[in-house]
Image (cartoon, rainbow, N blue to C red):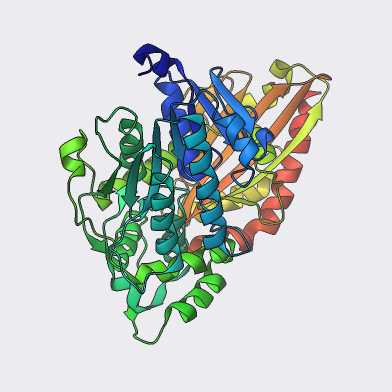
Amino acid sequence: MANESNIQDRPILLTGATGYVGGRLLTVLEDNGHPVRCMVRNPSSLSGRVGPHTEVVQGNVRNISELFSAMENIDTAYYLIHSMGSAGDFETEDRIAATNFAKAAKRCGVRRIIYLGGLGQHDERWSKHLRSRHEVGNILRESGSLVIEFQASIIIGSGSLSFELIRNLVERLPIMITPRWVSTPAQPIGVRDLLEYLYQGLNIQIENSTTFEIGGSDVVSYGQLMAEYATQRKLRRIMIPVPVLTPRLSSWWLGLVTPVYSRVGRKLINSMRYESIIQDHKATDHFELSPMGIKEAISDALLNEDKEFAQTRWSDALSSAGQYTQWGGTRFGTRLVDTRSIQVRKPPKEAFAPIKVIGGARGWYHLDWLWKIRGFLDLLVGGVGVRRGRRDPFSIYVGDTIDWWRVEQYQPDTKLRLVAEMKVPGRAWLEFEVTENEVGSTIRQTAIFDPIGIPGLFYWYFLYPLHNVVFSGMIKNIAKRSD
């Protein structure tokens, strides 16, 4: 038997590190001091996103020799791979991937495999998605490794496929004609609880391969999940159930409403006909965990999204996502982002100087009369309007008011983030960031809007041509003032 300390020193193999669950699990493993080896098809996709003790290797589960190399000196491996996003037959691709992984694990002596599958009782009419998830678990057990399979229902967290589908439907449709699967009961799990199960799976003491059914504390229908999301987003939604929307018709409807998720969503929607409720409760005997209910899980997802969003550096986010601002802005979750930058031949302190004194008597550097009209209109509908100005014309502190904005974040000579307190159908921010470069500084200006429902989307896109003129002129004049 291998020495326990040597086993603990070995890296943990993590597949799917560029995905939703895998990317978050990587952070958990790193934060707890574990050496990690990430196997990805394109190592550059993790550039700048891993810690100093994490190794990134190139590997594809369809290439057995790359798997042998990735599994060298590995004791525990996470299998977080699925092929639903592929254009081909994802069942066949999943089968090939799992078979190769099992062969490599057996040859390399991997002791433990932790796998995330789908929750649902065996049914001959199963969808391809559920059938494939369970088949993968069976194939991995053929490796001879100790396999810990977690079977989960809907994952509640900003970025998870199921949650994003629900979010898009609720955000975009004030009235929903809902098919029968909306009343199907499920047991959703918050992503924070899911990650805790996956992490505890490293050290759980069991003798044989085991499947654990996991979920949150509530059993709800998809309709109830949509209603709770709408409540927390302060949206009024009407759902009209009809018996005629088959899974095929529903998938077409889903493609029209949420085109970004249509390819995977159409494959997933067939699984929504089947109950995904925990029947085997042995996970409660093996794990020290009290999963949250849907109310807390949705609130946690929205709060975490706010936190992650507030920490975003847009130059990094846009380049890593391969996205650039387009007409109407770039979408990040529910938010719409319009960002632009300009170079100046001044050090950051001088480049930031005009930003530090923005608003109040100084104005907003372009078309001030439009800003004043907007302020008066806000006053007419009960907002703060143009009454406040600035506390001090030269200094800024977090919590200060600047006209109809409040300072949410401030780093001298580097960053200013303002959150709007005017009446708008959503939440709005205006952010300025200055970074040093080889010729001087880069000034980045970012307008962010989190629309609430259809009125919020209409507000953003209707005013976007005007915002485009205002914000373009603003950053150019800030650059001129710094010079």
Q: Going by the image, does 365 lie left or right of 374?
A: right
Q: In which quarter of the image is residue 282?
A: top left
The C terminus, quarter of image:
top right
**Picture quarter with the N terminus:** top left
* Residue for point 24% across, 62% down: 220
Q: Nearer the viewer, residue 340 or 120?
A: 120
Asked whether residue 408 is in view, the answer is: no
How many numbered marks are there?
0
Q: Can residue 57 be seen from the camera position used here?
A: yes
Name which residue lies at 48% across and 81% down: 249
**Would residue 264 appear left or right of 148 to someone viewing this image?**
right
Percent across and percent down for residue 440 are 80, 19
- Residue 101 horizontal/vertical position (percent): 52, 42
Closest to the observer, 470 or 42: 42
227 lies above or below 18: below
* Front-lying residue, 441 or 293: 293
Q: Which residue is drawn at 39% across and 52% down?
A: 138
Q: In this view, does 162 lie to the left or right of 412?
A: left
Q: Position of residue 457 (x, y in %)?
A: 54, 62
**In which image quadrant can residue 222 be found?**
bottom left
Up-down: is 436 above or below 187? Answer: above
